[in-house]
Image (cartoon, helix red, strand yellow):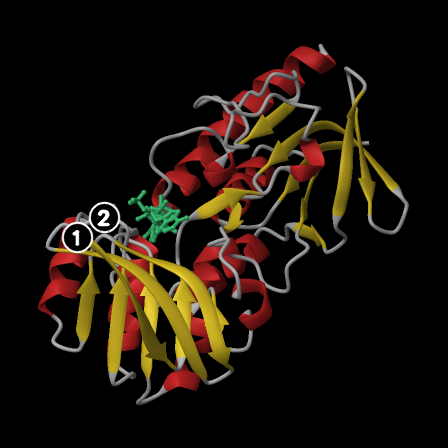
Amino acid sequence: MRDLVIIGSGPAGLSAAIYAKRAMMDVVVMEKAAFSGGQIVNTEKVDNYLGMPGISGFDMAMKFREHADLFEIEFDDREVMSLEDHGDHKTISLEDGTDLDTRAVLVTTGARHRNLGVPGEEEFAGAGVSYCATCDGAFFRNKEVAVVGGGNIALEDALYLSKMCSKVHLIHRRDEFRGEKILGAQVLETPNIEFHPFAKVTEIGGKPGSLELKIAEQVNGTPEEHMLLVSGMFIAVGTVPLTDFIEGIVELDEAGYVKAGETGQTSVPGIFAAGDVRTKNVRQVATAVGDGAAVIHYVEEYLNRLLK
Ligand code: NAP
């Protein structure tokens, strides 16, 4: 039986894995994605992680993984389907029908992008509508595109796309950004970014390469509807936690995040959560790495009590 199974290989999972290995735990990291790193793999540039100014998300993920490999941490690419609590051990069911027994589990599955939920979104996903500017931006070189959202990701996407696209329309439902002030200021200073405050995309039509976005906008306080023609559209309206496989096992909040404080302890003894997937106010690479490091202290305490 394993001491600890870590589910997810983003910054929280990899940080926890290094601490667990150094604490001499028998640990394995479940990583269903093709790359370690989680959401940062799709981030063009990370400018606020200590000691790595301006690093690309992909390079950062590679560095994190190289660090984990130095400690010879074991990875398993099978998808986790469900989790059962048996008190002193937990059973994890995998996609190939096999089970994995472990004394403790650490959930670090993070989050995935949120859909906008408007007509045409599903139809044009991958055919003009994208959720990843760093992955798909180059398809729209010298073209006009739209970005929807007002958080860090939308602001970063708008800035990234402004370097290669002829024009970027930033469509946000409010006039204030949720993202960092410094990014908001850069966006407003960039000549080929047009900011559309109090605006919503209500429908996506047209054809691949030539999208017709129906926009509901407030102009001088008066509601107006108009069409915006763009080649591509990037949706960056936040994330939703990846917790399907533990629904009904541990307590989740109303948005689906695992209820856990700084100790990572969930409502079930021996099941821990760290990083973006747990209830917290600040979801950054730095806070995920910190979570991963701290939680192992409490996992160790739990294992010591269990094995006494
Ligand atoms: P976010 O901060 O939650 O922002 C989501 C944005 O989408 C908000 O502006 C929100 O509008 C808008 N939105 C949500 N639902 C919408 C809808 N149905 N229609 C239109 N607009 C909608 O999400 P994010 O930008 O994806 O960032 C996710 C997390 O990653 C954040 O905690 C962020 O700080 C973090 N992050 C960290 C780093 C790093 O560590 N360096 C880098 C990037 C991001 P309202 O503002 O009106 O709610």
Is ligand 1 closer than 8 angstroms to the Cβ of mark 2? Answer: yes
Q: Position of residue 155 (x, y in %)?
A: 26, 60
Q: Position of residue 37 (x, y in %)?
A: 51, 56
85 lies left or right of 290? right
Measuring 48% from the left and 21% from the top, which residue is drawn there? 263
Q: Which residue is mark 1?
A: 222
Question: In the rendered view, would you say 306 is above or below 79?
Answer: above
26 lies left or right of 258? right
Q: Position of residue 160 (x, y in %)?
A: 29, 72
Measuring 73% from the left and 56% from the top, which residue is drawn there? 77
Q: Quadrant of the C terminus?
A: top right
Q: Quadrant of the N terminus?
A: top right
Q: Which residue is mark 2?
A: 174
Question: In the rendered view, would you say 186 is above or below 212?
Answer: above
93 lies left or right of 236? right
Amino acid carrying label 1: it is Thr
Amino acid carrying label 2: it is Arg
Q: Is residue 55 in view from this perspective?
A: no
Instruction: Choose between 303 and 8: the one closer to the eye.
Output: 8
Q: Position of residue 120 (x, y in %)?
A: 53, 66
Q: Secondary structure at mark 2?
A: loop
Measuring 60% from the left and 40% from the top, which residue is drawn there? 21
Measuring 71% from the left and 13% from the top, which residue is drawn there? 306
* First along the sequence among labels 2 and 1: 2
